[in-house]
Image (cartoon, grey):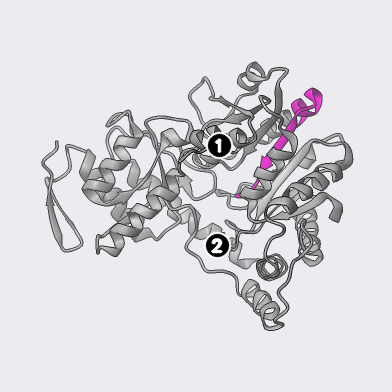
């Protein structure tokens, strides 16, 4: 069998691989705790279900415009005005099969072979591979001060004549850190001055804690939409816990949306009309579920941070948002892959290796589950790693004796 050189360079998704391993273990009756999960456990909003059901009962499930149905585009326009203070038109909106496809199609639209995309570390695992699929070159920028917050001086040093775009994800997956208003203002001004695309991955933008407010990148742009290289990516997956519905969107200038639509129509044709109807219902329905989810996640965040800080040698930055934290486990193992495999094997806890996010020795842990899962999961991790822990632990009805410390 022969596969392309491109296909050979794209590794399997580490999170999906872990999910599959955890699923198999659970089916075998193993007491797995999944702290690597990338979705909240809350249910789909009833308005989304009603809207999708109403469309389904018509039995008229056909193709839609490649860039999205008018009712959903109107809902996205309203959402953008209410949450960003920005008025855009339907020609500035494209709906895709998830925010991931929106970003992927955008990169295919703006990146030519060997052009560079600046990716701020720690970063979502898929960014570098999505750039490579476009035959572009991902340039990973890690703050020299060791923090999770990017610095303009580090970014400026990485920018070259080949730089085509910078991706900003705030609050950030995996660290949960929300970038400052000053930084967002600086990066918008910098990209406009350099004529570089600024891609704002805002998929978690309302899941923020401690009374922090949403920062709209549009507050800082000096250009009208049709002359701007500012692109905002968002979707219903995280805020509405609709990960399986696969509906996302991009807001960009008209010519970019037109080109994205051409690419999307040649690949997936259009998103499902049923799922677009569900997203329309979610955006136009009661929004109280978002605040309920946010409050739950903030409480879960506090529990996880408290538990992690009981493990000697582990340091963790308190997340400002999302449902992830990114603790440093280098005191126990500098290889995050080895550590992740060890925890799954010994205590049946799923954690995603930090190396996949651009920072070795860290683990991404999700607090999107229940408080019990968080407490039990961290207890198992502590027992497996901390030599000061008791030598025995019960996992389910099974007693384990530690023989590796």
User: Which mark, residue 244?
Assistant: 2
- Rendered location of residue 256, percent (x, y): 81, 42
Location of residue 298 with respect to 353 vertically, above or below: below
Q: Residues within 10 Å of mark 1 (few under 14, many from 20)?
A: some
- Report the Cα–Cα distance between label 2 and label 1: 22 Å
Q: Secondary structure at mark 1?
A: helix
Location of residue 244 with respect to 37 vertically, above or below: below
Residue 310: within the magenta?
A: no
Q: Residue at x 72, y 57 (%)?
A: 269
Magenta residues, start to end: 188-205
Residue farthest front in this picture? 1
Left or right, 126 with respect to 28, comes to: right
Q: Residue at x 60, y 37 (%)?
A: 133
- Rendered location of residue 249, percent (x, y): 71, 53
Q: Residue at x 29, y 55 (%)?
A: 376
In depth, the one of 203 and 393 nearer the eye is 203
Q: Which residue is mark 1?
A: 129
């Amino acid at each position: 069998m022969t596969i392309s050189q491109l296909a050979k360079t794209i590794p399997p998704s580490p999170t999906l691989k872990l999910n599959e391993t955890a699923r198999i273990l659970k089916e075998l009756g193993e007491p797995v705790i999944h702290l690597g999960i990338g979705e909240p456990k809350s249910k789909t909003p009833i308005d989304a279900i009603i809207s999708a059901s109403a469309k389904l009962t018509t039995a008229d499930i056909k193709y839609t415009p490649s860039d999205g149905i008018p009712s959903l585009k109107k809902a996205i326009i309203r959402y953008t005005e209410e949450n960003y203070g920005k008025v855009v038109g339907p020609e500035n909106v494209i709906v895709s099969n998830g925010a991931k496809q929106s970003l992927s199609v955008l990169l295919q639209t703006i990146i030519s072979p060997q052009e560079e995309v600046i990716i701020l570390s720690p970063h979502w695992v898929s960014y570098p591979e999505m750039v490579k699929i476009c035959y572009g070159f991902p340039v990973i920028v890690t703050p020299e001060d060791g923090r999770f917050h990017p610095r303009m001086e580090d970014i400026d040093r990485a920018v070259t004549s080949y730089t085509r775009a910078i991706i900003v994800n705030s609050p950030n997956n995996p660290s949960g850190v929300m970038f400052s208003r000053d930084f967002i203002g600086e990066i918008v001004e910098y990209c406009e001055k350099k004529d570089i695309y600024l891609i704002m991955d805002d998929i978690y933008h309302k899941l923020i804690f401690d009374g922090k407010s949403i920062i709209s990148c549009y507050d800082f742009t000096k250009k009208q939409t049709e002359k701007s290289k500012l692109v905002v990516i968002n979707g219903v997956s995280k805020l509405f816990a609709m990960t399986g519905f696969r509906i996302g969107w991009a807001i960009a200038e008209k010519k970019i949306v037109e080109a994205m639509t051409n690419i999307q129509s040649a690949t997936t044709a259009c998103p499902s009309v049923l799922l677009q109807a569900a997203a329309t219902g979610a955006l136009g329905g009661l929004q109280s579920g978002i605040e309920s989810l946010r409050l739950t996640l903030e409480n879960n965040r506090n529990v996880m941070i408290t538990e992690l800080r009981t493990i000697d040698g582990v340091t963790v930055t308190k997340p400002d948002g999302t449902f992830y934290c990114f603790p440093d486990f280098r005191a126990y193992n500098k290889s995050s892959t080895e550590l992740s495999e060890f925890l799954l094997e010994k205590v049946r806890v799923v954690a995603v290796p930090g190396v996949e996010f651009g920072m070795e020795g860290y683990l991404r842990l999700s607090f999107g589950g229940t408080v019990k899962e968080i407490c039990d999961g961290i207890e198992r991790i502590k027992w497996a790693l901390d030599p000061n822990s008791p030598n025995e632990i019960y996992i389910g009805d099974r007693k384990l004796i530690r023989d590796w410390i």
